[in-house]
Image: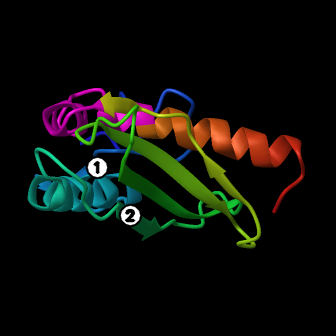
Amino acid sequence: MDINRINAYNIYNTNFTSEWKVKGEKMSSPINELIDELKKRAEFEITDTGYFKDIDVKVPYNKSLDRLSKLGAVVMNKDDEGNKDTRMLKFYAVSGNGQFKRTSAAITIGSRNDILNKINSEDFPKIIDDFIYDTYAYFRDRDIE
């Protein structure tokens, strides 16, 4: 295994990866932990119709970049003109000192199947990685620790 190989999802070289393999075994990373927990909870807790309790999944973030302390995703009801079947997926990150929180725009808005399809899509780790990079740059530019 080439230890210096750059991960396909890690296009910004930010030390964040969505897939690391050591001797054929997948190691845990914050992005993988978030995706795995979100998949488990979304498949079980999101209903096809009607309201459900918001799913808030967060993982502690490694200190490779000290400006972020937590990474999370939330799936919530989006009451759109009385339509109870619309759901919304968003990401958020918390600054290193815990005082600031940045939330993404809606990643997906749609039915239960739309949300699950987005979570299971191949580009989902890259979407998270892009959000992390943008959030890190946002905090860095505003000198937020």
Q: Is residue 65 above or below residue 123?
A: below
Mark 2 vs 1, N-terminal side? 1
**Residue 20 — which label?**
1
- Residue drawn at x 40%, y 45% is 17
Q: Residue lying farthest right?
A: 143
Q: Is residue 97 left or right of residue 87?
A: right
Q: Is residue 6 visible?
A: no
Task: Give how far across and how far down residue 89 sits, in percent.
Answer: 38, 42
Q: Is residue 89 magenta?
A: no
Residue 18 in the figure: left or right of residue 63? left
Q: What is the secondary structure assignment of the residue under circle 1? A: loop
Residue 82 lies in quadrant: top left
Check disc 1 and give the amino acid type.
Answer: Trp
Element type where label 2 sits in the image: strand
- What residue is shown at x 48% (from left), y 47% (from top)? 91
Q: Which one is in front in this view, the residue at disc 2 or the one at disc 1? A: 2
Count of number-bearing discs: 2
State the image coordinates of residue 39 (x, y, percent, origin top left): 18, 53
Q: Is residue 62 visible?
A: yes
Specify start and end residues of the magenta stretch as a single range. 110-127
Depth check: 134 or 39 in front? 39
Disc sitting over residue 99 in the figure: none
Residue that numbered label 2 is attached to: 56
Question: Where does the image place residue 139, in percent across and percent down from the top left?
Answer: 78, 48
Q: In the picture provided, is 63 more to the left or to the right than 96?
A: left
For the N terminus, give its image quadrant: top left
Amino acid at the residue labelled 2: Asp
The secondary structure that most of the magenta stretch takes on is helix
| Color style of the picture | rainbow
Q: Nearer the viewer, residue 74 or 129?
A: 74
Residue at figure coordinates x 35%, y 59% from the top left: 29
Q: Residue at x 65, y 57 (%)?
A: 65
